[in-house]
Image: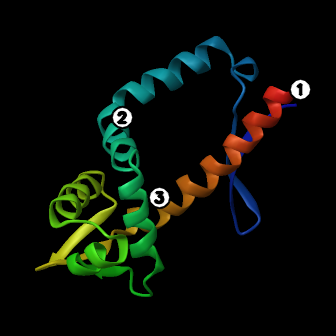
Amino acid sequence: MKLKLQLVQDGEIIFEIPLSPMDWSREHLRNEFNAIEEDFQRFSKIFDALAHETRLRMMKRVMEEEDRTISFSDFMRDLDLNPKLVWENARKLREGGLLEKIGRGRYRCSEFGESGFMMMSFALKRLRKALEELEEL
């Protein structure tokens, strides 16, 4: 089974990448790994932001709001968190570019956060399932 990741816009494939290292030339793999190194700091902040259950719950909660904004106190109440946990986790989400502070005690999902959180969540879920199927073969 050849596994590929495709990005489709209006029915047109705008990006396609094989997910099996055997489908890549050595040179192409080397170039991709070098590019990853160049973006490591940015990836690190994004992965760090999403590498904790509380931050995932916070992102899910803000995404549930029609205007993608939420207050500090709503995070505390809705997710049963103390102020220190809300502050620390909101800071990590801001550092990852997923959340913006828009006023005293109010947060908004950034444009990157909206699309990035959804895309990563859905894609990683499907990728995990596909990899589990490959393991079963």
Q: Which residue is mark 3?
A: 116
Q: CA distance from mark 2 to mark 1?
A: 34 Å
Please give the residue where the numbered disc 2 appears in the rendered image: 39
Q: Earlier in the sequence, mark 2 or mark 1?
A: 2
Residue 137's tag is 1
- Residue at image point 68% right, 16% down: 25
Q: Is residue 3 left or right of residue 119?
A: right
> Mark 3 is on which residue type?
Gly
Q: How many marks?
A: 3
Residue 68 occupies which quadrant of the picture?
A: bottom left
Residue 67, quarter of picture: bottom left
For residue 70, the mark is none
Label 1: element kind = loop
Q: Nearer the viewer, residue 125 or 116?
A: 125
Distance from label 1 to label 3 (Cα)? Answer: 31 Å
Q: CA distance from mark 3 to mark 2?
A: 16 Å
Q: Is residue 105 left or right of residue 19?
A: left
Q: Position of residue 123 (x, y in %)?
A: 63, 51
